Amino acid sequence: MDKFVIRGGAPLLGTVRISGAKNAALPCMAAALLTEDPVILENIPQVRDIETTRKLLAAMGAEVELGYGRAQHRTTIHCKNLASPEASYELVKTMRASTLVLGPLIARCGRARVSLPGGCAIGSRPIDLHIKGLESLGAKIVQDHGYVEATADRLKGAEIVFDKITVTGTEDLLMAATLAEGETLLQNCAREPEVADLAALLNKMGARIEGAGTATIRVKGVSKLKGAKHRIIPDRIEAGTFIIAGAMTSGDLNVTGCEPSHLGALLSKLHEVGVKTKHSADSVRVMGDHPLAAADIITEEYPGFPTDVQAQFMALATQAEGTSVITENIFENRFMHAQELLRMGANIKLEGRRAVIRGKSPLSAAAVLASDLRASASLVLAALVADGETIIDRVYHIDRGYENIEEKLRGVGAEIKRIGEIFPRRRGANG
């Protein structure tokens, strides 16, 4: 099992380029199920979840080609013949986003059998909102032996109000509605940039979608979708992680290939902390030459402070003067990294959904364990400023969502190496 060995103390200096957004790429890959024509996606990150989705689509009968060389961040997905509209447990047990194939399969094939998903153990993420919405569109759904089985002759448009804001639920129902008969009105939708990116692809495929990126989305169903070419948006969570890394290490880091308008809540909070940033159309320069001051955050749905950057901000808070309070409103079990940060010398007290961090704490190297994707990132950030050599175990979590993170960090001055069996990133196949 792979580990990271990180020696702290080096400021991050130079330029790092951000990859495509995993959380945008996954629903866009699922959207290819809606058409018999090829769908070409560019700026695809080379991470484990992408490879898992490739295997998942291939198992259904799709031809999925991942590029090499200059085209290594491009994939072509051709779902002409879907012989087996099923997502097995073995393929989806590591990935929450597997539920995204449910809506497209019902809409295109009239049936689907999808295992209840896995992913990070950060809290309850029920599929009931997906099921309730699909039933409103006319699907008949049963749950049996850990699987969701759904059938429908043709989905029919309906008005659907989400009881709770859900990103994957919004994406799943949005895809299903594109081929439904009549008009669908989705209310209380997720407003994340990844939802808008999916809608942009679907519209290129011939869908008729209005309002994506707002709380109300209107979809006029069509009988058939076509192929399209689409470039995935930059990963705002990866960008936020590197911006925080630059600030924590007293570095001077230019984070390029990102979309600063997607980072508003984080950049505003970092300004409050005392971090200096400058941004252009597609880059953010972070200058960590000022002392950090404590600040409170509350995680919220977009455009609020993202839960996926909460763990990284906690690492930053350990290096800020004063007391910071983090309130986690999205997931009930997303403070598992706190215990590992305590092992490194952090002063953190957990109070239910609140974490109280007292800084500035000198961190020291330790052997720590990654529990989930973003917790992994927080431990990497802490290790970058810790005294000595930190060993982070179970970094397969970080491989799910960060492309070549150790190589990118080394490129800007970090002392980091991977030991153990290296995950093969450059892999292409046709099913």
Image: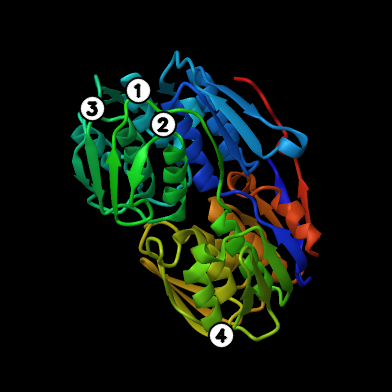
Q: Provide the secondary structure element on which disc 3 rests.
A: loop
Report the amino acid beneath label 2.
Answer: Val
| Distance in Å between CA atoms under marks 2 and 4 | 44 Å
Q: Quick one: label 2 or label 4, which is nearer the N terminus? A: 2
Residue 77 in the image: above or below residue 257: above
Residue at the location (48% across, 19% down)?
Answer: 60
| Distance in Å between CA atoms under marks 3 and 4 | 52 Å
Q: Provide the secondary structure element on which disc 1 rests.
A: strand
| Distance in Å between CA atoms under marks 2 and 1 | 9 Å
Report the amino acid beneath label 1.
Answer: Ala
Q: Which of label 1 and label 4 is nearer to you?
A: 1
Q: Provide the secondary structure element on which disc 2 rests.
A: helix
Question: In the image shown, does 424 or 356 lie closer to the viewer?
Answer: 424
Number of residues whose C-alpha sits closer than 10 Å to that of mark 1, classed few (under 14), some (14–19) or many (20 or more): many
Cβ–Cβ below 8 Å for labels 2 and 1?
Answer: yes
Q: Which of label 3 and label 4 is nearer to you?
A: 3
Residue 389 seen in the figure = no
Q: Quick one: label 1 or label 4, which is nearer the N terminus? A: 1
List the residue tagged with mark 3: 139
Q: Quick one: label 2 or label 1, which is nearer the N terminus? A: 2
Q: Quick one: label 3 or label 4, which is nearer the N terminus? A: 3
| Distance in Å between CA atoms under marks 1 and 4 | 51 Å
Q: Which mark is residue 101?
A: 2
Residue at the location (63% across, 57% down)?
Answer: 368
Q: Provide the secondary structure element on which disc 4 rests.
A: loop
Question: In the image shown, does 172 or 53 lie closer to the viewer?
Answer: 172
| Distance in Å between CA atoms under marks 2 and 3 | 14 Å
List the residue tagged with mark 4: 293
List the residue tagged with mark 1: 112
Report the amino acid beneath label 4.
Answer: Ala
Report the amino acid beneath label 3.
Answer: Ala
